[in-house]
Image: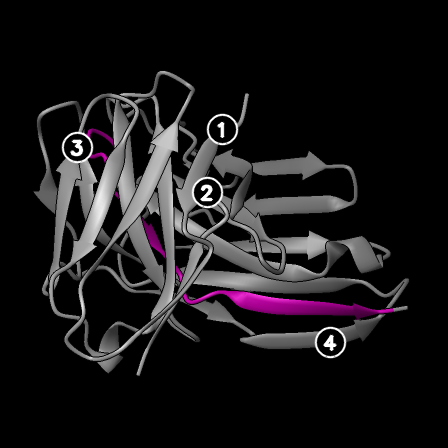
Amino acid sequence: TQLLEQSPQFLSIQEGENLTVYCNSSSVFSSLQWYRQEPGEGPVLLVTVVTGGEVKKLKRLTFQFGDARKDSSLHITAAQPGDTGLYLCADHNFGNEKLTFGTGTRLTIIP
Amino acid sequence: NAGVTQTPKFQVLKTGQSMTLQCAQDMNHNSMYWYRQDPGMGLRLIYYSASEGTTDKGEVPNGYNVSRLNKREFSLRLESAAPSQTSVYFCASSEGGGKFWETQYFGPGTRLLVL
């Protein structure tokens, strides 16, 4: 069974600071998705990365997929209170309907 | 478009009671899913339905049953609730076909407390 570990589990930083959160897998990802879940809501897809070494940017968010496709990172520049939420990584197995989710990083940005 | 809707939003049950969680989507999606979310454990798949008329077990199916009523609706039933089923339940849908870029769209969740 694939295990997706995310670190840190909790992170609380001041507005304007930079941060990085990580997702590591016990096996090679087929493709990796990052979701953000705001309090009281369901997760919302941020990005899908597929190729080893791939980097994608979404405004102040930078997503990187490891060369060996067993790890990924999410870097946020100049964090804002609106970035507060639970960040989840998920492996989307090609040809399979199912997603395997990581344990999540709960991020709090202090104004 | 409402997207994915879930009812009820909150529910308190006593041990042994039964209930059905309802989910509907208006995006004409083929695939639908039920997850539970517990602190520190991310989202775990309970059951999913790849198309109307089919259902399959996920990672944690014990104690649950599902019905894909039609293409729009996918319900989750707890026949005899246990305190271990206290959780937040999310329904999701996707176009289907297992494409690796596929997006799952989630409902707002049902918060269930079993006493």
* Mark 3 residue element: strand
Corner quadrant of residue A3: bottom left
Do the residues marked 3 and 1 share a common chain? yes
Q: Residue at x 79, y 53 (%)?
A: A82
Q: In the displayed structure, does residue B11 sit left or right of residue B96?
A: right
Tell me the magenta residue range: A93-110
From the top left corner, tell me how far across and down residue A21 is, in percent: 60, 63
Q: Amino acid at mark 2?
A: Gly
Residue under label 2: B107
Residue in the picture at 54% in, 63% down: A22
Mark number displayed over residue A12: 4
Same chain assignment for discs 3 and 2: yes
Where is residue B79, by image quadrant?
A: bottom left
Q: Nearer the viewer, residue B98 or B51?
A: B51
The residue at the point 55 percent across, 67 percent down is A105
The amino acid marked with disc number 4 is: Ser
Instruction: Return the residue at label 1.
Output: B3
For the N terminus of chain B, the image quarter is: top right
SS at circle 4: strand
